[in-house]
Image (tube, grey):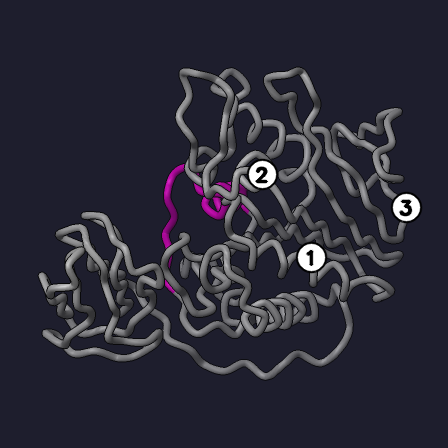
Amino acid sequence: MATQFLDDVIQGHQVIQSLNVADLNSGEHKFWFRIATNALSQWQHLPVLVFKGEKPGKKIMITAGVHGDEYNGVLAAQKTARELIGTEVAGTVTIVPTINMPGMLNHSRDFYSADPDASPANLNRFFPGDQNGNEAQRYLYALWNDLLKPNADLAIDLHTQTSGAAYPLYVFADFRIEQSLEMARLINPDAILNDPGDAGVLETVWNNHGVPSITVEVGMGRYTEQELISRTVTGIFNVLKKHNIVEGDMDPITSCLEGNEIISVKATHGGFVLPHVSLMNFVEQGQLLAIQYDSFGAEIKRYTAPTSGTVLSHNVESIRAPGSLIVRLIK
């Protein structure tokens, strides 16, 4: 597949319908990727940044914004791009920072469609898309086939925890894939989960296509956490340096918790929940995790650890519906 340059220019940047970085001259490129029309027949465009070196090397793809309210991932992708400006590169770094444009415009995790028969869709359950599917599936089909798939030897997908709960810097990696586990450790996170993958998830689709991939969770949804963003960017540059895409000394790698199991404690009732643990606390079985109160402020439920483990997530929005996450443990 060749890069398809269109005649349109938006805000000074050329519009493309497909990308093959092999077609590009060395240098720093900014494009608008024409992905799909909306219900008013208006084309939607995603920003794409490409940093291509004169020397050959690996192709790395960095994506963010698959969930439209996970801004720390977007900010980490953008900061990575800013720090690459003027940097000598071997190979190619491609950055797509705002994948779920309809979701972002609605401050929503999900993809919003004007189709009256379509519900909001979690895009990270529908990769690689379907050219004959609903609007979200067609959107992903163009994204995957015309932009992502041709341009990666390694892939990093940046996320955050779902809105209403917190994460540390946390990575999903399939431990069966040596380069995925290596990348996860190079990020220098607080925790890594052995993730064999799930159907429809971008990381899994990359791995199934022979491209080692990781998913990086950069703290909590919606709210900016600059320290975690900076740590993420430092980790991404560790990956780039390890694969000789950029030169320089890597930051020292600190060993972190590597787990194989997740235990989620969810609300049995609706009400207001105050956590009694902090991220990365180790808890014993039976230890108090959180207390829940009704609308009068009376205590209605105490949540305790069903097993020992380390606190990977807890709610930061106090109001919790039945079934909402309260605490997540990793072990």
Dividing the picture into quadrants, the one containing residue 101 is: top right
Does residue 173 show up?
Answer: no
Disc 2 is placed on an element classified as: helix
Secondary element at image label 1: helix
Q: Quadrant of residue 194?
A: bottom left
The residue under label 2 is 105
Who's the residue at 83% across and 34% down the image? 10
Q: Relative to 95, is 329 on the left or the right?
A: left
Mark 2 vs 1, N-terminal side: 1
Q: Residue 59, percent across and down?
A: 71, 52
Q: Which mark is residue 25?
A: 3
Highlighted magenta segment, given as a residue range: 193-210
Q: Which mark is residue 78?
A: 1
Q: Left or right of 201: which side holds 87? A: right
Q: Is residue 36 above or below residue 152?
A: above
Structural distance between the alpha carbons of marks 2 and 3 = 33 Å
User: What amino acid is at disc 1?
Assistant: Gln
Q: Measure the alpha-carbon separation of dots 3 and 1.
A: 22 Å
Where's residue 233, x and y in %?
A: 63, 67
Q: Position of residue 52 (x, y in %)?
A: 82, 53
- Please tell me whether mark 3 or mark 1 is closer to you in this view: 1
Q: Nearer the viewer, residue 151 or 133?
A: 133
> Which numbered disc flags the more N-terminal residue, 3 or 1?
3
Which sits in the foreground, 177 or 48?
48
Q: Residues within 10 Å of mark 2 (few under 14, many from 20)?
A: few
Q: Amino acid at mark 3?
A: Asn
Instruction: Name which residue lies at 48% across and 42% down.
Output: 108
The kind of residue on which mark 2 rests is Leu
Pointer 2 or 3: first along the chain:
3
Mark in the foreground, 2 or 1:
2
331 displayed left or right of 175:
left
161 above or below 302?
Answer: above
